[in-house]
Amino acid sequence: MDTSEAKSIIEAILFAADRPISPIQFAGLLEMDVTTAEDILLQIQREYDETGRSFQVIEIANGFQICTRDEYASWIKKFYTIEVSSRLSVSSLEALAIVAYKQPVTRAEIEEIRGVNSDSVIRTLLEKNLIRVIGRKEALGRPLVYGTTTDFLIHFGLRDLSELPLIEEIDTMLGKPKEEIGSEVRKALS
Amino acid sequence: MYKVKLQIFEGPLDLLLYLIRKNELDIYNIPIAEITDQYIEYINLMQSLDLDVAGEFILMAATLLHIKSETMLPSGSVDDNDEVMLTREELVRQLLEYKKFKEAASILSYKEEVKRNLYSRSFTDPAIEGFELREYRISASLFDLLSAFHKVLNSISEEQIAEFDEDIFTVEQKIGEILQILETRKRIEFSSLFKDICSRLEIIVTFLAILELTKSKFIVPRQSRLFGKIWLYRLNKPKAVEAA
């Protein structure tokens, strides 16, 4: 199989897929090196960028996926009358941030940081499949420990967890008064 | 009477951070008396508006009063053995820790907003989804699992088996590994989970993990015909375990 044929096959699968597909999966299907598969994916990505297509190939959740470009979002929303309410609540985001950075983490540890009962928010996150049980802690009562899922990466458009800024760097990275950020978030989510 | 459940603050720490910001205070050097008064004022306000004030808010008010009393009395006159209450240092440490994650949450919120404007295909042709399920619709019983397990045990040659004295494999670990595999794929063949395993203990632990996952409805074992190959399918909503 030559490269151009492999490229067409990969493109066809990307086009039909409803989830990110990793270079490893393509390599397995087409019996090629993972790096070759990755090169082809990046090539397709570049082509879409250079020819100004209204869709793009993004790297997300350790894989690649075709999606539209953000400048067409308003038209897509208008056509499909997409509901606006699909954002997560502040408490969900807080709990998720703790799980993302501290996983594996127990409910008690989440509650200690937030200073409030987090039962229902954890249940919501489990139902949305943004976090999952990844085992039990070897401590009194052997409590369940939680971690983030692939759906978490997809929801936030992250390639992998390393794409999150280091928790120590957050202060300097934001570089603006905390009040502004707090109220922005509150405003955005109210 | 109908009670408004309006959540203004995520919790007592959130309210404290708000007061600190509002008064442009230094988090390391909080004037406890002042902040305590303001905090209690807010709690009263929330209560008079008939908002649901959670117990954590009240506990924090008590903590603040406790710290305040400590600062006002000569040292040693307040019982320091009281372990329920936070000390001032502990409170500051907690506030800083919470603040970090609050900011991390705002970064997530930003990323969520960006991602929300990118649309991708959200369903696969039902023909693709349904194919496997039609074929593998017979659910495997505990006995099917046991006999498959028996086969795995027998298929391992003696020299392949290395015994370890220490308890290095745990069921929890295996559960984690299997769930990890099933995150990216919908199903996995039963015997493939035992591939590359060379200790009897690990085989047993793996099998126990499969049983546990089946019991808690994380996975469901299926086969295409009786005594056929067993495939473990991931169930989409793994929420049953939380309640257990």
Image (tube, rainbow, N blue to C red):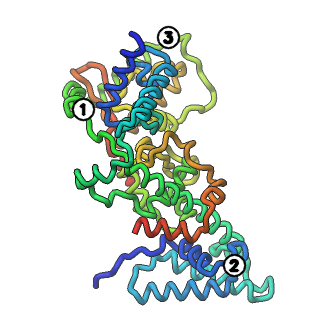
Location of residue A55 in the rendering, given as x and y in whole percent from the top left corner: 36, 38
Question: Sequence order check: which comes first, mark 2 or mark 3?
Answer: 2
Q: Is residue B13 left or right of residue B140?
A: right
Among the 4 quarters of the image, the one containing residue A47: top left
Looking at numbered disc 2 in the image, what kind of residue is underneath it?
Answer: Ile
Dot 1 or dot 2: first in sequence order is 2
Disc 3 designates what residue? Answer: B157
Three-letter amino acid code at the position of disc 3: Ser
Image mark for residue B30: 2
Q: Secondary structure at mark 2?
A: loop
For label 1, the crowd category at 10 Å Cα-Cα, with few meaning under 14, some 14 to 19 and many 20 or more, is few
Q: CA–CA distance between discs 1 and 3?
A: 38 Å
- Residue A48: where, in percent of width, then height? 40, 33
Instruction: Please give left or right for residue A176 compared with residue B125 in the image.
Output: right
Q: Element under label 1?
A: helix
Name, please, the residue furthest toward the front: A51
Q: Based on the displayed image, in which of its 4 quarters is residue B53 positioned?
A: bottom left
Q: Which disc is residue B129 wearing?
A: 1
* Label 1 vs label 3, nearer the camera: 1
| Front residue of this view, candidates B199 and A70 | A70
Q: CA distance from mark 1 to mark 2?
A: 59 Å
Q: Quadrant of the N terminus of chain B?
A: bottom left
Q: Provide residue B94's location: percent of width, then percent of height.
A: 63, 67
Q: Is residue B85 above or below residue A147?
A: below
* Marks 1 and 2 on same chain: yes
